[in-house]
Amino acid sequence: MPRAPKKTEKTEKKTPIARAKPSRRATDQASAAVTEVEISRLAYQIFESRRGNGGSPLDDWLEAERLLRTPDAR
């Protein structure tokens, strides 16, 4: 009767790495109040300010988000 092959490698269980969640501080509370509608409107204003030449919608969005969420930029 044939024997089952021996297991030569042990399977190790990998422990998942815990990722730190970003904390919400007092400065983050103001940025949490910023809505996607506000970001969208400002991104469109940025787009219009350059008359639609160059840039990208993503860059406009990220710039608008940065401006609205950074307390010093307001």
Image (tube, rainbow, N blue to C red):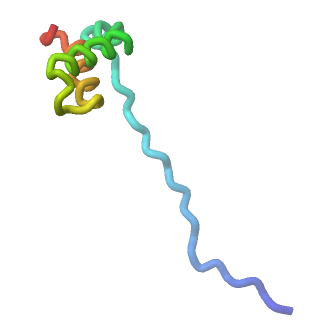
Depicted 3 relative to depicted 18: above or below: below
The residue drawn where x is 14% and y is 22% is 50
**In the picture shown, does residue 27 fall above or below 11?**
above
Above or below, comparing residue 10 to residue 70 in the picture: below
Residue 61 placement: quadrant: top left
User: Which corner quadrant holds the C terminus?
Assistant: top left
Q: Picture coordinates of residue 13 (x, y %)? A: 55, 57
Count up the numbered dots: 0
Outermost residue, bottom side: 1
Name the spot of residue 35 as percent of width and height, x first.
37, 11
Q: Nearer the viewer, residue 28 or 3?
A: 28
Name the residue located 24 percent from the left edge and 25 percent from the top edge: 60
Q: Quadrant of the N terminus?
A: bottom right
Residue 37 figure quarter? top left
Image position, residue 7 (x, y; %): 64, 78
Residue drawn at (27%, 17%) of the image: 44
Which residue occupies the foreground of this view, 59 or 10? 59
**Vertical side of 16 occupied by 71: above or below:** above
Occupied quadrant, residue 27:
top left
Residue occupying image coordinates x 13% and y 11%: 72
**Most foreground residue, 68 or 14:** 68
74 relative position to 44: left or right: left
Residue 38 horizontal/vertical position (percent) = 32, 10
